[in-house]
Image (tube, helix red, strand yellow):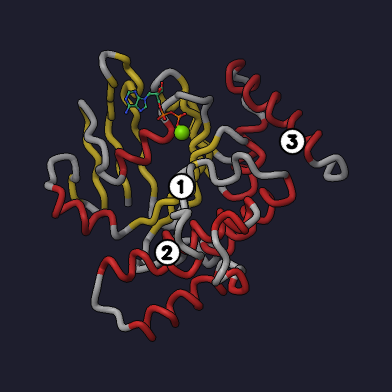
């Protein structure tokens, strides 16, 4: 379980998070929604201990991580994988080397073992045929898939974190990536790997999550399921959803 208790954080006197609290089981499929600059990426970094909050506690699996050293944090980070928004692949390496990078860095794997793992991972994300291609030769969707494969290398995460996984993709490709995200967290609640996806895209969120948090002015002002989200009478949230649903309708003309 992840517990965020009253997290506050400011960057140079600019308050970004102002008492954020929520808890999530590792198997939950959570979306953190919010406009640009509301602190969504910051929350993911705080969960991984990449940023320390000014106030509040983060408890992962019963362990308060706010005061841990870098080396102690490493074992906490292994419970997660994160696919950062930039999805950054190394331009100078082909897909295979990108995915193998963490395995090599960790050491202890033979070349055959690395080959086998990379193949398995690429199959899992559906781009095994791109193994020898360079990042620039990949479509946007394939780049995201490669980034997801890379994040999965060398770890057996309890939960996957995704930062804007569909931003910048065309609707069909975005839908594809949502399918992959769902495949990777399939299984029964309680047993599956869950995910936390942060996004400003409510269409994507609705496809991969069953619990929705809305971040506004540094606080979680909504935390509920999809029907509740679509029926919210909070005017701010309504506006956010409506504008995105409109974009969604244009993007999926035949989808209703
Ligand atoms: N390292 C940083 N230094 C200063 N300001 C930052 C830093 N990272 C983020 N910010 C600011 O904090 C706010 C929240 O950022 P972020 O968590 O990236 O928001 P989101 O992911 O919701 O777009 C933004 O106003 C951003 O400009
Ligand atoms: Mg962000």
The residue carrying pointer 1 sits among few (fewer than 14), some (14 to 19) or many (20 or more) residues within 10 Å by Cα, namely many
Between residue 97 and residue 4, name the one nearer to us: 97
User: Which label sits on residue 44?
Assistant: none
Judging from the image, what secondary structure is the residue with disc 2 in? helix
Which residue is disc 2 drawn over? 152
Mark 1, residue position: 196
Q: Is residue 85 visible?
A: yes
Name the residue at 45% across, 62% down. Answer: 93
Q: Residue at x 48, y 70 (%)?
A: 96
Asked if disc 2 and disc 3 are in contact, CB closer than 8 Å, the reply is no
45 to 128, vertically: above or below: above
State the quadrant of the C terminus.
Answer: top right
Q: In terms of sequence position, does the residue under pointer 2 or pointer 3 come before the other? A: 2
Apparent side of residue 146 relative to residue 117 in the rendered image (left or right): right
Q: Ligand 1 is in which quadrant of the figure?
A: top left
Kindly report the distance in space between the C-alpha atoms of the residues bearing marks 2 and 3. Answer: 30 Å
Q: Secondary structure at mark 1?
A: strand
Dot 3 falls on a residue whose secondary structure is: helix
Q: Position of residue 67 (x, y in %)?
A: 13, 41
Mark 3 and mark 1: Cα distance apart in space: 21 Å
The answer to whether residue 78 is above or below residue 163 is below
Picture quadrant of residue 55:
top left
Residue 173: image location, x then y, percent: 69, 51
Q: In front here: 24 or 74?
A: 74
Question: Residue at the front extreme?
Answer: 92
Front residue of this view, candidates 33 and 51? 51
Which residue was labeled with disc 3? 248
């Amino acid at each position: 379980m992840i517990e965020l208790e009253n997290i506050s954080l400011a960057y140079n006197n600019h308050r970004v998070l102002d008492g954020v609290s929520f808890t999530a089981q590792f198997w939950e499929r959570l979306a953190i929604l919010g406009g640009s600059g509301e602190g969504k990426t910051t929350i993911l970094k705080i969960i991984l201990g990449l940023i320390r909050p000014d106030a509040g506690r983060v408890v992962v699996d019963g362990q308060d991580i706010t005061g841990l050293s870098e080396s102690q944090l490493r074992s906490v980070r292994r419970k997660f994988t994160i696919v950062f928004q930039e999805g950054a692949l190394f331009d100078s390496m082909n897909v295979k080397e990108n995915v193998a990078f963490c395995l090599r860095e960790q050491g202890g794997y033979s070349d055959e073992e690395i080959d086998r793992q990379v193949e398995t991972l690429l199959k899992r994300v559906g781009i095994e045929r791109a193994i020898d291609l360079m990042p620039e030769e990949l479509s946007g969707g394939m780049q995201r898939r490669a980034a997801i494969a890379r994040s999965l290398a060398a770890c057996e995460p309890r939960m996957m974190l995704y930062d804007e996984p569909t931003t910048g993709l065309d609707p069909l490709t975005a839908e594809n990536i949502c399918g992959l995200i769902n495949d990777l967290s399939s299984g029964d609640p309680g047993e599956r790997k869950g995910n936390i996806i942060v996004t400003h895209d409510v269409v994507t969120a609705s496809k991969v999550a069953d619990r929705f948090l809305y971040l506004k002015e540094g606080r979680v002002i909504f935390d509920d399921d999809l029907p509740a989200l679509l029926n919210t009478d909070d005017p701010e949230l309504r506006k956010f959803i409506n504008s995105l649903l409109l974009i969604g309708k244009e993007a999926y003309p035949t989808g209703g």
